Image (cartoon, grey):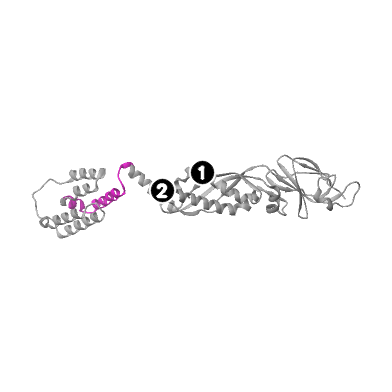
């Protein structure tokens, strides 16, 4: 029977735990453990170790728990079978994480539902080798970073989604502006997630959120960004949404057939412009003054306008009143003018 003389790590550096391929050992077998590694001998659920960095002879003197498992002397050697596990204690900083699909979250600032994505990176190291072997590795022959990330992906993703959603809502920060809080969110999540990993003998050494974003192609995102761009434009020009809507109504009315003459003849050009107020109102006042026809002798509206024209002008006056461009009093006054009634 051939026994292994030397047992040492031959695994990939990215592997967190690796099992030596042979179990045929003896009390003359040399176990070599490198720096940042630990080793265990395992048989029948009994763990002997950990063996730290250095050279170890697997004899009865340093294997007290295995003494009853040794066989009879065999050519000066005492054969026995046991698994040898190596655990890599090096910190791994290259594990990536991200959401497989966006979470739907109501933006606390703009009150619309937005699809939110996030991705980043974390680092870990094995803090308790025996706990790690017992709870995660089990009967596998090797356990690499990809396998570890797969084990934790579900739990971490759920916790990360919850923490990010709570942080955004609590801070009342728009999803579009949350990038300014990535560092504080990363620290908060690191503390929270560390408890989940510690249960399996894994320490979370680093956790970073690289980005929290929304899909640019999403219709709601597109509409929101267009609205914000329009809001910024109005702010630069110096008027608000109500004034913008008033301007749109006046443009529409001015584009209707015969409306310009009808409105200016009825005195609406100047009156409506003044009702808008602010810079826009002043602008309309100037426009009204430029296109207001020269004063003529007062003539009853019924004598100069047909019934059809008066009805059209009254409808347009009603639209202006409903849009908030003119007041109820102004509407009544202009209505009387159109109908040729006394004030």
Secondary element at image label 1: helix
Say few, some or many: other residues with alpha carbon within 10 Å of mark 2 (under 14 / 14 to 19 / 20 or more): few
Q: Nearer the viewer, residue 2 or 202?
A: 202
Label 1 or label 2, whichever comes before in sequence order = 1
Say few, some or many: other residues with alpha carbon within 10 Å of mark 1 (under 14 / 14 to 19 / 20 or more): few
Q: In this rendering, would 256 be left or right of 110? A: left
Q: In this rendering, would 182 be left or right of 312? A: right
Residue 265 in the image: state x and y as whole percent. 15, 51
Question: Magenta segment range?
Answer: 236-264
Residue assigned mark 2 = 225
Q: Nearer the viewer, residue 299 or 326?
A: 326
Secondary element at image label 2: helix
Residue 133 in the image: state x and y as whole percent. 70, 51
What number is the disc on residue 169? none
Residue assigned mark 1 = 184
Q: In this rendering, would 318 be left or right of 209? A: left
């Amino acid at each position: 029977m051939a026994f292994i003389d030397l047992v040492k790590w031959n695994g990939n550096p990215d592997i967190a735990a690796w099992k030596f391929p042979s179990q045929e050992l003896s009390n003359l077998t040399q176990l070599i453990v490198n720096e940042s590694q630990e080793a265990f001998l395992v048989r029948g659920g009994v763990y002997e170790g950990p063996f730290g960095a250095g050279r170890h002879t697997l004899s009865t003197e340093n294997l007290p728990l295995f003494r009853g498992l040794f066989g009879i002397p065999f050519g000066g050697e005492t054969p026995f079978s046991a698994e040898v596990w190596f655990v890599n204690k090096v910190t791994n900083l290259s594990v990536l994480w991200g959401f497989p699909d966006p979470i739907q979250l109501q933006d606390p600032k703009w009150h619309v539902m937005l699809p939110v994505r996030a991705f980043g990176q974390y680092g870990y190291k094995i803090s308790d080798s025996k706990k790690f072997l017992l709870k995660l590795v089990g009967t596998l022959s090797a356990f690499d970073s990809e396998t570890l990330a797969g084990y934790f992906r579900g739990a971490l993703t759920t916790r990360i989604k919850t923490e990010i959603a709570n942080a955004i809502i609590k801070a009342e920060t728009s999803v579009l502006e949350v990038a300014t809080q990535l560092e504080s969110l990363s620290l908060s999540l690191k503390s929270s997630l560390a408890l989940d990993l510690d249960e399996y003998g894994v320490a979370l050494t680093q956790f970073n959120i690289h980005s929290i974003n929304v899909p640019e192609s999403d219709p709601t995102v597109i509409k929101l960004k267009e609205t914000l761009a329009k809001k910024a434009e109005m702010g630069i020009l110096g008027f608000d949404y109500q004034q913008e809507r008033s301007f749109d109504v006046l443009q529409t009315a001015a584009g209707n057939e015969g409306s310009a003459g009808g409105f200016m003849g009825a005195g609406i050009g100047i009156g409506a412009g003044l009702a808008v107020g602010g810079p826009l109102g002043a602008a309309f006042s100037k426009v009204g003054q430029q296109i207001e026809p020269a004063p003529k002798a007062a003539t009853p509206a019924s004598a100069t306008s047909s019934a059809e024209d008066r009805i059209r002008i009254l409808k347009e006056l009603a639209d202006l009143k409903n849009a908030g461009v003119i007041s109820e009093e102004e509407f009544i006054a202009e209505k009387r003018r159109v109908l040729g009634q006394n004030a």
